[in-house]
Amino acid sequence: MAKNIKDFQYNPRIGRALSNASRGKADRYHIISREGEWIIKKDGNVKPKKIYSSRYSAIRYAQSALMQGKVREYVVHKKDGSIQEIKTRR
């Protein structure tokens, strides 16, 4: 029995499956207002994924990603940072 992480052998099929499974848990976009622009950030990322001049455009992008199955849900934040709404794919 392996007692140390170094004792495990990498299996590409299992590694890919685990990577895809963990990716699904973090698939959430946050729409946030910053310095007069609306940015879309993915959970766990520091850099914005997209930057829009209007809130409407940012929400449209997130809705499109949600309908295409690229994300599990998106969260719209008010200008003060509080959550306004959460949309989830059903």
Image (spheres, grey):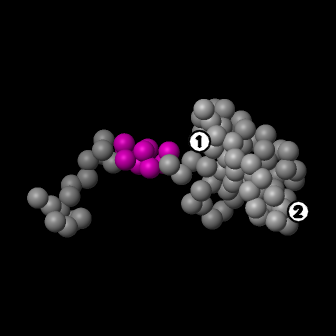
Instruction: State the residue lying farthest toward the left.
Output: 1
The image quadrant where one finds the C terminus is top right
> Is 53 contained in the magenta span?
no
Q: Estimate the x, y position of residue 41 in percent, counting from the top left.
A: 67, 56
> Is 22 contained in the magenta span?
yes
**Foreground residue, 12 or 41?**
41
The residue pinned by badge 2 equals 36
Give amino acid for label 2: Gly
Which numbered marker is on residue 72?
1
Does any portion of residue 50 appear in the rendered image? no
Instruction: Please say if 84 is above or below 81.
Output: above
Give amino acid for label 1: Arg
Q: Quadrant of residue 63?
A: top right
Q: Is residue 5 left or right of residue 57?
A: left
Q: Estimate the x, y position of residue 79 in percent, counting from the top left.
A: 84, 62
Q: What secondary structure predominates along the stretch shown in magenta? A: helix
Does any portion of residue 20 appear in the rendered image? yes
The residue positioned 26% from the left and 53% from the top of the image is 10
The residue positioned 50% from the left and 45% from the top of the image is 24
Span of residues in magenta? 16-24
Mark 1 and mark 2: Cα distance apart in space: 27 Å
